[in-house]
Amino acid sequence: MPRWSKARVALLGASLVTVCALAAGGVVLRAAGAEGGYRQVVTFSEVLSLILENYVDAPDASSLLSGAYDGLLSGLDANGAYLDAAEVEAWKRPAPENPAGPGLVGLKAGGSFQIVAVASGSSAEAAGLRPGDQIRAIDDIPVRGESLAQLARKLLGPPGSKVRVSVLRAMEGFRRDDVELVRQARKDAPFAVDLRGTVAVLTPSDVSRIDADDVRGALRKAREDGANRLLLDLRSVSTADVRDASRLLGLFTAGPVLRLKDKKGTVAETLEVRGNGDGWEGPVAALVGGATAGCGEALAQVLRAKRAAVVYGESTYGLGTEPKFLPLPGGDGILIPAFVWEPVGASVWARDGIEPDRVVRGEGRPEEIEADQLRRAVDLFSQSEVEAERKAA
């Protein structure tokens, strides 16, 4: 009989507890059927055994199983995560009053936290961070296995405080760089309205700070200057808080627009827009891309359902769930995407994202692609006006 090390005995013992818990709770068996679930449990145990037999170094039982839990939860979507006791305490800790950030927005991409937007005048911009750069650690703690909500929280703190990030700079051959950023209250304009011929382009940069009356005034001026069509550029609207969408949606529609449901279809919350939809009377369109997530996806999908908005661009990220915290014995816990946002009159965008009505991609040098994509979308939207006039004639 082979002689087993203490590490192997501990690991196999822990794995046995895990397997028994899964079987007793029916998690795997209910998910994949009794026979298929049993095979998965056996495979899990076999993989652990093979690691112990062949791994060149002595594995740490707790780290190995923790990694397995991380993979299990993070494989659900960006809102799933396994939390150890310290992370549970951090999750329960109330957010600071008037929190500030370093001026960047990121989304989970594989094992990294990829920057998708950098605020003008922010500490992140001053440090030369750009969309596409990958954050590998925040305050020396790796981002792998943490939920998007956890990562967003770690970036926030009291104004003037500092946060340290380890970054792979995409435009510099993924050179690793450690940068200390200062958290500051954002002072850049939360939106911009530009006129492109007869198309007004509304670009939200920070939906959480938008004042609907300010947007209404900017759109009124655009109409006075000759605009008769409105395109919302949502390519960098990536905040996970879908509720922020109500700040803009009241300009275009009214009443219930989104419902938050659990897996049984029970409605946990209804997002109702209290505006009167008088912000824009003409045709509406949206431009989306891979960094459009959460609030941006909600805006596009509701406008598609309520205002027959044409969606241009590329497939979106697919962030439309809400996490639920569940405690575990010993002080650990898990975040499970237990609720999903469903637009009234449109399909759920969680996980698969939104497919555009017209695929539009930019061309040129890397720094030109974004502007070229917007130009192409504006041209298509303008052409649809000409086509509509021809049909009417």
Image: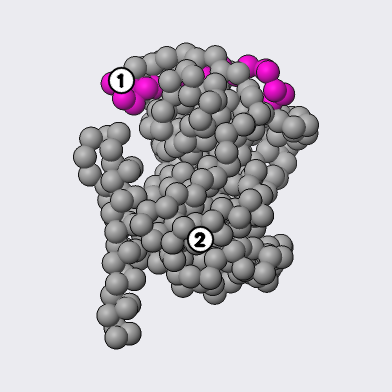
Q: Give me the disc on residue 224.
A: 2
Looking at the rendered structure, the number of numbered marks drawn on it comes to: 2
> Along the horizontal axis of the image, is 32 left or right of 249?
left
Q: Please report the residue visible at 57 percent of the width from the left and 38 percent of the height from the top.
A: 189
- Disc 2 or 1, which lies upstream in sequence? 1
Query: Of circles 2 and 1, which is in front?
Result: 2
Q: Quadrant of the C terminus?
A: bottom left
At numbered mark 2, what does the secondary structure look like: helix, strand or loop?
Answer: helix
Q: Amino acid at mark 1?
A: Glu
Q: Is residue 351 magenta?
A: no
Residue 52 image point, x, y percent: 43, 25
**Label 2 crowding class (10 Å Cα cut-off): few <14, some 14-19, many 20+?**
few
What are the residue bounds of the magenta stretch?
A: 157-174
Q: Give me the disc on residue 172.
A: 1
Q: Please report the residue visible at 68 percent of the width from the left and 18 percent of the height from the top.
A: 160
Q: Give me the disc on residue 93.
A: none
Q: Is residue 346 visible?
A: no
On screen, 15 above or below 41? above
Q: Quadrant of the N terminus?
A: top left
Determine the image quadrant of residue 174. Answer: top left
Q: Is residue 175 visible?
A: yes
Q: Is residue 160 magenta?
A: yes
Residue 158 image point, x, y percent: 72, 24
Determine the image quadrant of residue 161. Answer: top right
At numbered mark 1, what does the secondary structure look like: helix, strand or loop?
Answer: helix
